[in-house]
Image (tube, helix red, strand yellow):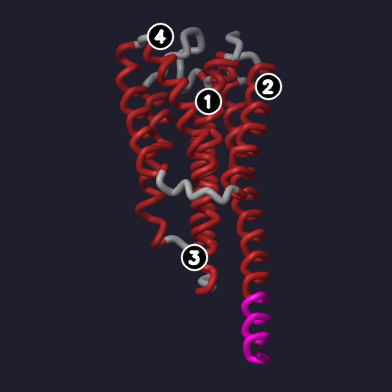
Amino acid sequence: MADFRTARGVAGARTAQIDEGLRAHMNKVYGTMSVGLLVTAGVAWAVGSSDALLSIFRDPATLQPNILGWVAMFLPLIMVFAFGAMINRLSAAGAQLFFYVFAAAMGLSISWIFAAFTGISIAQTFLVTSISFAGLSLWGYTTKKDISGWGSFLIMGVIGLVVASIVNIFLASPAIHFAISVLGVLIFAALTAYDTQKIKNDYIQHAHAMDKEWLGKAAIMGALNLYLDFINLFMFLLQFLGNRE
């Protein structure tokens, strides 16, 4: 009986240690993501609110991208694939630096919104996105339901969105644009909950190994995933809530 109580006490202490570690891990994920969003917002505002800077990438009147504009538009996508390929060779500090550079590139990519939409509508959309994201992420973290099965369907949905968006660049169809925006909101809302639960479960599965290098890079990857969910949710909601200049 004494051995059983001792074992139970050790197990309870180990569980408490994992719970404490999980809270610290999630705080790092959200903290890194928040810094990334601030970097993105700063770069986007600095470029988008300056006609001189914006004209380097887009026509100030029509907002159509030039060659550099196309490069800026697709640079974040290229960097995401590069990050996935390089993550195992990067240190935790290197991964974090790469993430912040990526966040700056994303800010450059979406800087045009400050010339296309009113500042008030951008702020309102950001607030709506923040509240929605917080609720969805909290649900993903606390729900007892296993939503890991959503992953393959959501990834296929994201691929479909990317392909449809590229095609519609040339078609310029309002109907397709509207459909993409609706589906984008739904897909990235679901991804917010899915990614949060995945980050939590991945930590619990690896916590016993106490691999500090893995934990550091896992926090950056988790921040990147949630950052992408937030940015995409914001951009799709902006199509509905944003007021044009």
Mark 1 or 3: in front is 3
Residue identified by numbered label 3? 205
In the rendered view of the protein, which quadrant contains the C terminus?
A: top right
Residue type, label 1: Met
Q: What element does badge 1 sit on?
A: helix
Q: Earlier in the sequence, mark 1 or mark 4?
A: 4
Q: Which residues are magenta?
A: 1-13
Mark 3 or 4: in front is 3
Q: Residue at x 66, y 60 (%)?
A: 24
Q: Nearer the viewer, residue 160 or 94?
A: 160
Q: Residue at x 59, y 49 (%)?
A: 141
Q: Residue at x 36, y 38 (%)?
A: 153
Query: In the picture provided, is 75 more to the left or to the right than 233?
Result: left
Residue identified by numbered label 4? 174
Residue type, label 2: Gln
Q: Nearer the viewer, residue 35 or 184?
A: 184
Q: CA distance from mark 4 to mark 2?
A: 24 Å
In the rendered view of the protein, which quadrant contains the N terminus?
A: bottom right
Q: Residues within 10 Å of mark 1 (few under 14, many from 20)?
A: many
Q: Earlier in the sequence, mark 4 or mark 2?
A: 2
State the image quarter where residue 45 is shown: top right
Q: CA distance from mark 2 to mark 3?
A: 38 Å
Instruction: Give the main secondary structure, helix, strand or loop, of the magenta stretch.
Output: helix
Q: CA distance from mark 3 to mark 4?
A: 45 Å
Q: Residues within 10 Å of mark 4 (few under 14, many from 20)?
A: few
Vertical relation: 143 (above or below) 87: above
Q: What element does badge 4 sit on?
A: helix
